Structure formats: structure tokens, C-alpha cells
Image (tube, helix red, strand yellow):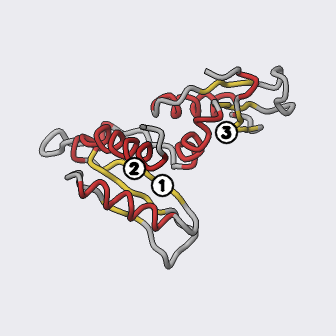
Amino acid sequence: MPDKAEFITVFRSADSTAEEDATNARERLAQEGIDGIVLDDDAPGVVEGTWEVRVAPSDQARAEVVLAAPAPEPEDEDDVSEEGLSEDLDFVSIFSAQGIEAEMEAISIQSVLEANGIPCTVIGSAQIPSLPFEVRVPKSRLQEARSLLEEVRQAGSGEGE
């Protein structure tokens, strides 16, 4: 693990809820397997009145994607009927991005997943460029899809060799 002084800020807030927001951001990163640290303005380099989350430079791109995606809404258990519903069939986001290359990357991810038998759907519209493109997979296949995409990324970058 790199020296914590080399960590890069991926989240910063000066809101009244900044400490809670930073803690929640670090927890979202931890759920994705990314180690982050929460710092307040007592730490060197942190702007006065703010809270930050920092990650290792090697995790920066993934962390920014995770934090750019909308935070999952807490489920209201009263709204869920026990009959006929399976949470494993709920679709969850595995990719979300906005910008010129987002549609192309979403379609590429869809192709890889479907070629490996993982059902998915792409949400987004080229006609409304201010909205992100998102790829969703069944909740029960999320880990399998993540592993597959990580394997493809490593093969494409030559890291797996």
C-alpha cells in the first residue's frame, strides 16, 4: 500500500453534513473493495472547513466512477411484498458514466456480459447527453459480472500477464 501522503482526494465536502457524507463515501468505496481514508481539516493539505476521502493513486479512477454513480436508495421494507418478489432478480448498476465515450463503453460492456451469458440492460439516450449511460445486471449475477469485467480490463491493459 502506498504511503498515505501519496493518496489522492476523490471526495471533498464543506457542507454541514460533510463528516457524514465523507464517511458514507468511504463506505461505498469499501463495498467496492477500495480502501479509502477520511480526513478532516486537521490533516495536512485538507482545506479548512472540509472533510475529504482519499484513495491510493491506483484506485483513483475506480473510486471516481463509484462516487459518480448515484448512491443506492435505502429500501423501504414496507413497500416490498413477500409474495412473488425475488431480490435476486432486481437489476443493479454495474457501470455508469456520462460524456462522449459513455455510450460506446456501455455498449462494449453489454457485449462482453451478454457474450458470457450474463443478462444486462443499457439505460441512456444519446439524444439527451446530460443523462448518464448505465449498464445494469441482475443482483444475483453482480459479483460474476464484476469479476468478468475486471478480468477483461486486466487482459486489455496487459496487467494480467
Q: Toward the viewer: 93 or 148? A: 148
Name the residue: 58% across, 36% down.
59
**Residues at marks 1 and 2 touching, judged by CB atoms closer than 8 Å:** yes
- Estimate the spatial distance between the alpha carbons at disc 1 and disc 3, rounded to whole Å: 17 Å
> Residue 3's quadrant in the figure?
top right
How far across and how far down the image is residue 6, in percent?
A: 73, 28
Query: SS for tag 1?
Result: strand
> What amino acid is labelled 2 in the image?
Ser
Residue in the image at 44% along x and 42% along y: 154
Q: Which residue matches tag 3?
A: 10
Residue at image x 72%, y 32%? 52
Q: Which of marks 1 and 3 is nearer the N terminus?
A: 3
Q: Where is residue 147 in the image (x, y as percent from the top left)?
A: 34, 39
Q: How far apart are marks 2 and 3 (CA)?
A: 20 Å
Say which residue label 2 marks. Answer: 93
Q: In x, y percent, where is residue 143?
A: 31, 37
Given residues 66 and 144, the one toward you in this image is 144
The image's mark for residue 29 is: none
Q: Please state which amino acid type lies under the numbered disc 1.
A: Ser
Q: Which residue is denoted by mark 1 in the rendering?
A: 96
How far apart are the two marked residues, 1 and 2, measured between alpha carbons?
Answer: 7 Å
Residue 106 is left or right of residue 64, and the answer is: left
Q: Is residue 80 above or below residue 123?
A: above
Disc 3: CA contacts within 10 A as few (<14), some (14-19) or many (>=20): many
